[in-house]
């Protein structure tokens, strides 16, 4: 398997798996219901730029990120975007890293 470097925001990773480890560790630092820190929000916004449905995810703007239960009955937790209009939408770390 070929190891391909990846850049996300100001961070460089030797391979996609390293980026996945970074963002997954970030997710694990938060409990369900917590708002993501401003420093981590910068990192999440950089990751979100890779999402193929970016405009849909952002909507009219991002108020903040939070951690909540995964949608549709899936186990675990994930990052959610809370938009400036008060609506919420989830996004997947793996989806943002797909195709890297």
Image (cartoon, rainbow, N blue to C red):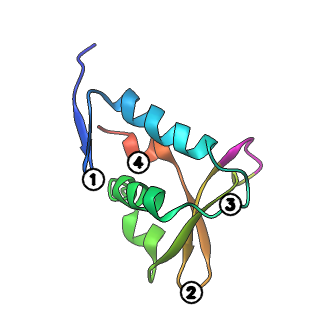
Cα distance in 3D space between marks 2 and 3: 19 Å
Q: Secondary structure at mark 2?
A: loop
Point out the frontmost of discs 2 and 3. 3
Give the residue number, with chain letter if any, for mark 3. Answer: 34
Cα distance in 3D space between marks 4 and 1: 13 Å
Across and down, in percent, residue 37 comes to: 53, 61
In terms of sequence position, does the residue under pointer 1 or pointer 2 come before the other?
Answer: 1
Mark 2 surroundings within 10 Å by alpha-carbon count, few (fewer than 14), some (14 through 19), many (20 or more): few
Cα distance in 3D space between marks 2 and 4: 23 Å
Q: Secondary structure at mark 4?
A: helix
| Residue 23 colored in magenta in the image | no
Point out the frontmost of discs 1 and 2. 1
Instruction: Name the residue located 48 percent from the left edge and 45 percent from the top edge.
Output: 93
In terms of sequence position, does the residue under pointer 2 or pointer 3 come before the other?
Answer: 3
Give the residue number, with chain letter if any, for mark 4. Answer: 96
Quarter of the picture holding the N terminus = top left
Give the residue number, with chain letter if any, for mark 2. Answer: 85
Q: Secondary structure at mark 3?
A: loop
Mark sitting on residue 9: 1
Residues marked 4 and 1 touching at CB (< 8 Å): no
In terms of sequence position, does the residue under pointer 1 or pointer 3 come before the other?
Answer: 1
Cα distance in 3D space between marks 1 and 2: 26 Å
Is residue 2 placed above or below 68 in the rendered structure?
Answer: above
Q: Is the stretch drawn in magenta largely helix, strand or loop?
A: loop
Range of the magenta residues? 73-77
Mark 3 surroundings within 10 Å by alpha-carbon count, few (fewer than 14), some (14 through 19), many (20 or more): few
View extreme (bottom): residue? 85
């Amino acid at each position: 398997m070929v190891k391909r470097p990846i850049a996300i925001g100001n961070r460089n990773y030797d391979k996609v798996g390293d980026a996945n480890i970074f963002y997954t560790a970030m997710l694990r630092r938060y409990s369900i219901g917590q708002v993501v820190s401003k420093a981590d929000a910068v990192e999440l916004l950089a990751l979100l730029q890779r999402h193929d449905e970016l405009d849909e995810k952002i909507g009219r703007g991002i108020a903040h990120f939070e951690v909540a239960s995964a949608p549709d009955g899936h186990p675990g937790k994930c990052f959610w975007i809370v938009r400036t209009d008060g609506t919420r939408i989830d996004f997947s770390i793996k989806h943002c890293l797909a195709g890297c």
